[in-house]
Image (cartoon, rainbow, N blue to C red):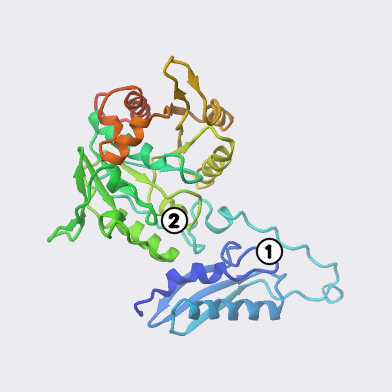
Amino acid sequence: MSDVDPISLLEPAATRVRDPVSGRSVWLAGMIQNPRPKGEDLVYDLVFTAEHGVSERQSIQAAIEQNLRGLGFRGRVYAMPAGAPPRMPAAQQGQGPRPPARPPDPVKGMSGPGMGPHGGPIQKKPVEGVRHVIAVASGKGGVGKSTVATNLAVALHRLGARVGLLDADIYGPSVPTMMNVHQRPMADANSRKILPIESHGVRCLSMGMLVDAEEAMIWRGPMVMGADRQFLQDADWRGCDFLVIDLPPGTGDAQLTLVQAVDLAGAIVVTTPQAVALADAVRGITMFRKLDVPLLGVVENMAWYELPDGRRDYVFGQDGGKRTAERYETDLLGQIPLRSALCEASDAGVPAALGSGPEADAFLAIARRVLAKLPIGASA
C-alpha cells in the first residue's frame, strides 16, 4: 500500500458524491462497505438499491474514483457493485413503481449499534490500563468545554483518582496552556508507547505539545482522526482510573470516530444558558444517545455573574442548562459561575480546581458526582 492510505480517503471522497435516491452523500447513505487493500490497489463494496438505474450506478462509481484521485490516491480502484438489480419499467414488473427506499439515519444508517463507519462492525479497542474513559463535549465552541475538561481532571485527582487528560481538539488545542505543559512527550524505548507529560498530578497529551504554538494544523479529516486514534491507542495511559477526553466542538467526523474507537464509560455535555448554545448542546446529547454512549449529565458554564452586592446577574440567561438536563432526563452535574478568576487561572496554567473559592467548589462537586456514577473505590 502506498504512503497515502486509500481506506482513510474513502470517506471524504464518497462524502462529495450525492446519491440521487436518498438525496444524501453516498457515504451517509451507507453505500460504502467493506473497504480493503489489495496490494497497491483498493477494493470496496458499493451497495445499490433497486431504485438505482444503470447510468446512476456508473456515474456514482466514476465520481468516487475521480475524487480518490483528487485526494492523492494513485493505485487502481475496484468497486464491487452489490445490492438489488436495476429498476425495471412498471409494465414489465406487472406492478407500479416501487417507492424510494427510506434513507437511513445520518448516524445509525451509517454506523448504528454494532456498525462502523464503513458498514462493518465497530472495532472498539479498550484503552489499556484505564478504568473509565470520559468524553467532555460541546455542540459548539466557546462555551468552556476545555475549561471544564481540565478542571474536572484536576478535581478528580484532588479527590484521590489517578487521571489522564487527552486533548483531542487537533485544530485548537487548549490543554498545554491550561495545564502549563509545553515540553514534547517522548516514547518509551521498550514499549514504543508515547509517554504523556504529568502536570498538577494529571498525565496530559495534546497535539499542542508536538507543534509550535503558532502553527496552524491544516489537516484533512482522515489525518485528524488518525492522530486522535494514535493518542488513544499508542500512548501509555496505564494505571489511570479516569481518562478525560477533551473532544473538539461539534458532532462531526472526529467526534464520531473517537466515540466508535473506544468504549466510553460516559459523556458530559458542556453548554452555557444561552439559547443558541443550548440548541447545539441538544445535538450533542442526541449524538451520544444514538451511539449508545451513557450520558453522565450536563454542565452549565457561565451560569451567572455575581455582583459586588451579592446579587446574581444572569448574563446569558437563567437555568438553561438545568432545563435542558430535565427535558432530556439526565443530570445537571453543576453550574459554573462566570468569574474573571477562572479565566485568569486557565491562562496562567493553574486550573481553578486546584485552589479555593466558588469555582473550585463547583468543579469538586462535579467530580464527586462523576465518582458517584463511576466509582473507583477511592474516598470522595
Mark 2 residue crowding within 10 angstroms, few (<14) / some (14–19) / many (20+): many
* Rendered view: 253 above or below 278: below
Q: Is residue 198 above or below residue 191?
A: above
Q: Residues within 10 Å of mark 1 (few under 14, many from 20)?
A: few
Q: Quadrant of the N terminus?
A: bottom left
Residue 190 position in % (x across, y down): 12, 60
In screen coordinates, is 94 left or right of 121? right
Amino acid type of the residue that numbered disc 2 sits on in the rendered structure: Ala
Q: In the rendered view, would you say 104 is above or below 323? A: below
Residue, x 37% and y 31% (percent of image)?
A: 340
Q: Residue at x 52, y 72 (%)?
A: 13
Which is more toward the observer, 233 or 167? 167
- Where, by quadrant of the figure, is residue 369 drawn? top left
Tell me the quarter of the picture where residue 268 sits.
top left
Labelled pair 2, 1 in contact (Cβ < 8 Å): no
Residue 242 visible somewhere in the drawing: no
Can residue 250 be seen in this snapshot? Answer: yes
Vertical order, 104 against 50 (above or below):
above
Q: In the image, which disc is placed on residue 254?
A: 2
Secondary structure category for the residue under label 2: helix
Residue found farthest to the top? 309
Q: Can you give x and y, in whole percent of width and height, for residue 331 in the image?
A: 48, 28
User: Which image quadrant: the C terminus?
Assistant: top left
Coordinates of residue 192 in the picture (x, y in percent): 18, 61
**192 lies left or right of 330:** left
Q: Decide which of 281, 244 is in the foreground and name it.
A: 281
User: Who comes first in sequence, dot 2 or dot 1?
Assistant: 1
Q: Residue 182: give x, y in percent of width and height.
A: 22, 51
Which residue occupies the extreme front position in the image? 308
Residue 23's disc number: 1
Looking at numbered disc 1 in the image, what kind of residue is underneath it? Gly
